[in-house]
Amino acid sequence: MMMLFPSVSLLLSAPAIAAAALGSPQIDLQQPLHEGTSHFSKIPSLGFGTWNLDKTNVSEAVSAALHTGYRHIDCAAIYGNQKAVGKGIAHGLESLNLDRSDIWVTSKLWNDHHDPSLVEEALTQTLHDLGLAYLDLWLMHWPVGNAPLTGKSQLDYLQAWHAMEKMHKTGRVRNIGLSNFSPAQLKDVIEQSESVPAVHQFEVHPYLPQTKWIKYQQKLGISVTAYSPFANTNPTYNSGKHDPPLLLTNFDMLAVAAKNGCTTAQVALVWGMSRGYSVIPKSSHVDHIKENFGALRCHLEEEDLDRVDQISKNYLKRFNNPSKGYGVKLFDGLEDA
């Protein structure tokens, strides 16, 4: 268990953070957002995820991430830990003498608040839990909402999106976007709305590269955030069968890491950021938090990136697909749907 709010001395020193900020020459430290639909033009490429954090030290992990140098925190209402995340943010900002505007905070609208009359309530609760006056980015977590009378899951996103657009205009949400949408659903939102989503967040890693899908959105000016960048290393996806092998123990990942003096986790993150999107690894342990941030100092040659690109030819696997649980078809038209 991590000690309560570790001091800066336990984490990266200021010179180390500055050195990391120089980054690998292959990595843009910030990714652009769609002009005209967002208040801020860029999102930090390396973020800190908060899904499934150890409940005993969420606040400490978030504060540690900020002390390490992360300036992008990703959270969600359904994670059930936003109050603890908010405490970690508050401690990190105060102890580092940072302003709210120095960090980027993302949260997400959950399925049970897709009814347009409930969207503002969801935003208000999220801001209250996080202790913030505004979000930098608010995503619709899934294109699935709960039916008003039965509570049964259904594809239900347009009216919720339009309600999110209204919240965007209030200034309490600086940018709005989507998560886990299919190509047809994304097209539907764009064609029937006033604005283009600023960001789309979905599963991406070397076992699920989704290259065409990413490039399509980048051409539209939509920034992509990759969740689960370590694939089945996440215990939620790890069935124990290891088919495919755990990404961070994959032979090709190990070879690329050894060649370049990096860890396999850093290789996975550099591979992602070099493709022009942001990544949000998570960890409850200070050593891993520091290791992941060290990806900004890991340089890979083009041949190394190409080798990681080839991994999915032998192993193509989507790990997060709740289609059966929701009773609706998700990710239609995408890899391993």
Image (cartoon, rainbow, N blue to C red):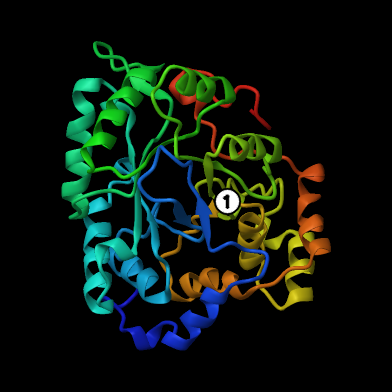
Q: Is residue 267 left or right of residue 237?
A: right
Q: Is residue 118 above or below residue 282?
A: above
Q: Could you tell me residue 136's position as x and y percent?
A: 33, 49
Give the quadrant of residue 6: bottom left
Residue drawn 43% across and 17% down? 192
Q: Which residue extends farthest top? A: 149
Give the side of residue 285 with respect to residue 246, left or right: left
Q: Amino acid at mark 1?
A: Tyr
Q: Quadrant of residue 53?
A: bottom left
> Which residue is rendered at x = 17% and y = 33% of the image?
121
Residue 265, image x and y in percent? 61, 65
In the depicted structure, whether residue 189 falls above or below residue 171: above
Counting labels gives 1
Tell me where residue 312 appears, x and y as whole percent: 76, 45
**Residue 251 in view here:** no
Residue 323 in sight here: yes
Residue 293 vs 274, above or below: the answer is: below
Q: Which residue is mark 1?
A: 277
Query: Is 128 or 58 nearer to us in this picture?
Result: 128
Secondary structure beneath label 1 = loop
> 321 or 199, which is in the foreground?
199
- Residue 206 lies, in percent from the top left, at 69, 50
